[in-house]
Image (spheres, rainbow, N blue to C red):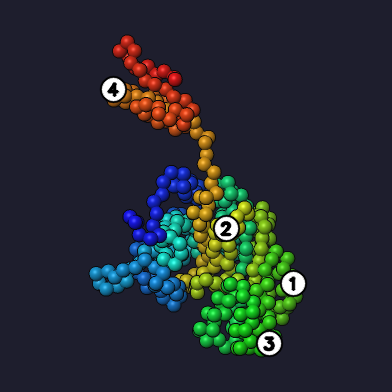
Amino acid sequence: MFLPAGSKDEMGISLNNRFHVMEKFRKVTTLRGYKPISTPVIEYASTFTNEFIDMKLQDMMKWFNGEGEIEVLRPDWTTAIARALSNLEKKPQKWAYQGSIFKRNMPGVEYHQIGVEIIHHPELMGESECLLMAQAFLKEIGVGTCVIELGHTEIYESLVAEMQLSKADAERLRLAMHDKKKDEVYQIAIARSNKEKAEELASLVDAFGPIEIIAEYEEKWKERENVLGTLRHIKKLAEILKQSGSGEILVDLGRVKNLPYYSGLMFRGFLQNSGAVCFSGGRYDRLYEQFGESISAVGVALDVEVLAAQVKESDTLEKVCIIANEESLAFAEEVRKSFENCIVDVQSEAENANDYNKVYEIKKLNGKFEVIER
């Protein structure tokens, strides 16, 4: 009644957990050599709706400014950061961000994200750093290892490129593959190619499983050198992750991109206990073309709400209550300093004494303040 649909207040434990996640993220990324970056919460809509990004205007929080141009609340961090970085010196860079994005097409309106963007790095180095950073961060907040899924835009797109598809059919086919609708993939493909090619494309729906599945497809596609190179790339990355102590690694050879700017490896992380997606990302070299640049770029975004829900509230700090009155408030502030690394609450009366490990009262005896433990 008092808030717009999708908006919500936050307080107490959930807010503490979110701050905890973001503070740990800043620590991990700082120690791994990332620099912080933030972009304005208000951007021009055209930054996100052009042919390279193709985000839908109806999914954004938008309005007309005084000059008649459409402005939006930031719907995507990666695109906004690319705009900010496009004219910087062309040297290896690692950037970390944290803040909100705003979308209408999901439950709620405001979503809290943390993530990194890596540019001008060799492909395998940037991709492995994204995933190794994510795993190090998950361990830092006590989540542990997660299931990592690897995919690549080149596999699906190399098979589809052989078909003469209209824009509408191409989108129908992409959605069918995304939703793993094997029969629908086959029906769309058979209308634009022969049976052999339609069956090959439809089989991608089932090309999902442990990393060992790659060997099967290396044999199957031994005549397709471009796809074989992609499979080798995935295997190299998986080996780096294994050697670094990562958990289970899965491969989805039929993975399709959700945004046009993805142009290579894609990955997701799933929590072991619930299966929820805790991070996603990939390579997006094409994104910088809208700014007239050709840049090697890869990034990963982590879902703060999903991760905050995994944080267990810590009770390691001792809670102390000091009972004081108006006359003894200044003295109570001095007493507070003697309790290092404790939560110290000054109250007029300890109404909830059971909430504290120790309760002290300041009394005036013989003209002097004394601290007495209850």
Q: Nearer the viewer, mark 1 or mark 3?
A: 3
Query: Sequence order check: which comes first, mark 4 or mark 2?
Result: 2
SS type, badge 3: helix
Residue toward you, 51 or 177:
177
The percent coordinates of residue 28 (x first, y second) are: 52, 49
Q: Which mark is residue 216?
A: 1
Q: Quadrant of the C terminus?
A: top left
SS type, badge 1: helix
Q: Quadrant of the N terminus?
A: bottom left
CB-based contact (under 8 Å), mark 4 and mark 2: no
CB-based contact (under 8 Å), mark 2 and mark 3: no
The percent coordinates of residue 40 (x first, y second) are: 36, 60
Reply above or below: 293 against 308. Answer: below
Query: Sequence order check: which comes first, mark 4 or mark 1?
Result: 1
Q: What residue do we see at 46% from left, 64% from top?
A: 106
Q: CA distance from mark 2 to mark 1?
A: 29 Å
Q: Amino acid at mark 1?
A: Glu
Q: CA distance from mark 1 to mark 3?
A: 21 Å
Label 1 CA crowd tier, 10 Å (few <14, some 14–19, many 20+): few
Q: Amino acid at mark 3?
A: Lys
- The residue to which callout 2 is attached is 276
- The residue to which callout 3 is attached is 195
Q: What residue do we see at 49% from left, 70% from top?
A: 295
Q: Is residue 301 visible?
A: yes
CB-based contact (under 8 Å), mark 2 and mark 1: no
Q: What residue do we see at 30% from left, 72% from top?
A: 69
Q: Is residue 340 visible?
A: no
Residue reaching furthest to the left: 66
Query: Sequence order check: which comes first, mark 2 or mark 1?
Result: 1
- The residue to which callout 4 is attached is 327
Residue toward you, 150 or 58:
58
